[in-house]
Structures are given as C-alpha cells and as structure tokens.
Image (spheres, grey):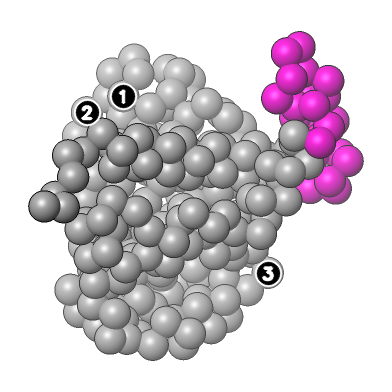
C-alpha cells in the first residue's frame, strides 16, 4: 500500500469553504468518512471552532452554489445535499451527498480513475489549505493522477506535494520517508530559525517573516505547522524505537 499526502491552497473566491475558513483561522474541518464511486460521493465531516465560525461553515455548506469538493469553477449541474448531524457551541458534524455530472471533477474521482478502486481518503481543511491523504494499492499511475489534478484545479489553487509513504514500511518499522521535509516546508523552517522566530522572546513574528519570504501569512503558518508536526512525529518515533526492547538474541 502507498500513501500520498498533498495540499491544495485555494485562491480567494475559488472555494466557498476555503474563504470561510480563511476568515476564521482557528477553525478546522476534518473528514470522519469519505467514499466515492464513479458517479457519486458521500462524506461526513467534523468541524471545530468558535460558535461564529461554525455558523459560517454550516452556511457555506448549505448555501453554496455547488458542492465544495467539485473542482469545476462554475455550476456543473450536479445534485448535492448537506445535512447537519450535530451542531453545538464548539462542534459541527455534516453529512454531504453528491451526484456528479460529466462536467464535474474532484480529487476522489480523479484518484479512482488513475489509482483504482478501493482508494481511501482522509482530509483536513484549515484556512485556504486543503490537505488530502490518499491510500491506494500502489499499482496505479501517480504521475497521471497529479497531471489530471493539476489540470482540473487550473488557476484556482496551488498544489503542494507533502510526502509519499510506503504504509507497510511505516506499520512495521515506525518510520517513513517523512524524515525529508518538502522543500517549501524546509525553507520556511530554516528562515524561521535564521530570523529568530523560535527565540524567546521572538525576534520576528509570523507576519514579518511571511513578508520577508514574500508568501501569504496563511501559507507560511501552514508550512511551519506541517514541518513542526513532522519533526514532532519523527522525535516520538525515534524515542519509541529507543525504548522498545531489542529483539536481537
């Protein structure tokens, strides 16, 4: 089995949910379940944030002109519906169902076309960054998948490859090729260290660092978070391996 992790960074006005999350930086939407067939997609999502953020997220899902996962830039004529399963002060759970038309395109459907049936999906949406993790058999054409995805996304979003992983190696040995940070994350981390972002007190804030790197503040924040998460996971993996009893006789 293989795992692909990549992110789409939506430009303003291209994705209603991304615009809503950009207005609420502390809000987060993650998938609890996501399934796709050749013509349909259904999913359950869990959102967290302030009461105002959750109200706006619910509104974005319920009143969008067309389904948020569709990569078409105009109304594609698809049939879609969203139901609120739970809504409290700090939690929102949504069920969405989508029947696509020939004009529709989405990450799951492009993945099925190139990576085969039985593909598993996990998503995380924060700000304008929509992170996808796809687990597949490893037999498909990954290059063709990304080529078609880039064409479908067009100018609405930038695509950033985060990592590829052999899930069997990860399961057996507790580590993967995540030891190598993607270039964008490595550059962000190096700049943060160089300019004193991690000093106490900080010599530079994230806004000043983003201006120095000539990238949006949200982009830099996302890259630093992902880099920090990978470094933390790497540390925990190594500590676990160090503490595990040796099997050598």
**Whether label 2 touches label 1, CB < 8 Å:** yes
Please give the name of the residue rendered at 32% of the width and 68% of the height, measured from the top-left corner: 166
Please give the name of the residue rendered at 66% of the width and 51% of the height, measured from the top-left corner: 186
Numbered disc 2: secondary structure: strand
**Whether label 3 touches label 2, CB < 8 Å:** no
Residue 123 x/y as whole percent: 37, 51
**Alpha carbon distance from label 3 to label 2:** 35 Å
Chief SS of the magenta region: loop
Q: Which residue is mark 1?
A: 91
Closest to the observer, 63 or 187? 187
In screen coordinates, is 194 left or right of 185?
right
**Alpha carbon distance from label 2 to label 1:** 7 Å
Q: Is residue 42 visible from the viewing direction of this image? A: no
Residue 238 x/y as whole percent: 37, 41
Q: Which residue is mark 2?
A: 86
| Residue 207 magenta | yes
Residue 72 drawn above or below residue 138: above
View extreme (left): residue: 249
| Residue 148 magenta | no
Residue 44 x/y as whole percent: 24, 46
In screen coordinates, is 26 left or right of 67?
right
Residue 102 drawn above or below residue 93: below
Q: Which residue is mark 3?
A: 155
């Amino acid at each position: 089995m293989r795992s692909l992790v990549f992110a789409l960074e939506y430009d303003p006005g291209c994705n209603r949910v991304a615009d809503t999350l950009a207005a609420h930086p502390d809000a987060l939407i993650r998938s609890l379940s996501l399934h796709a067939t050749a013509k349909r997609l259904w999913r359950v999502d869990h959102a967290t944030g302030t009461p105002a953020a959750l109200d706006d997220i619910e509104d974005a899902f319920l009143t969008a002109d067309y389904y948020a996962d569709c990569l078409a830039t105009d109304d594609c004529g698809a049939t879609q519906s969203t139901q609120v399963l739970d809504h409290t002060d700090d939690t929102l759970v949504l069920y969405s169902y989508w029947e696509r038309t020939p004009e529709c395109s989405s990450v799951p459907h492009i993945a099925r076309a190139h990576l085969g049936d039985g593909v598993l999906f996990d998503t995380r949406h924060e700000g304008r960054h929509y992170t996808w993790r796809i687990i597949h058999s490893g037999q498909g054409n990954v290059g063709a998948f990304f080529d078609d995805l880039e064409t479908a996304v067009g100018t609405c979003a930038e695509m950033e490859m985060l990592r590829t992983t052999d899930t069997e190696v990860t399961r057996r040995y507790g580590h993967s090729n995540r030891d190598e940070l993607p270039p964008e994350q490595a550059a962000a981390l190096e700049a943060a260290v160089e300019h004193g972002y991690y000093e106490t007190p900080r010599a530079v804030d994230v806004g000043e660092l983003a201006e120095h790197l000539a990238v949006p503040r949200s982009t830099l924040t996302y890259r630093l978070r992902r880099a920090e998460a990978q470094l933390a996971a790497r540390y925990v993996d190594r500590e676990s391996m160090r503490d595990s009893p040796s099997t050598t006789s």
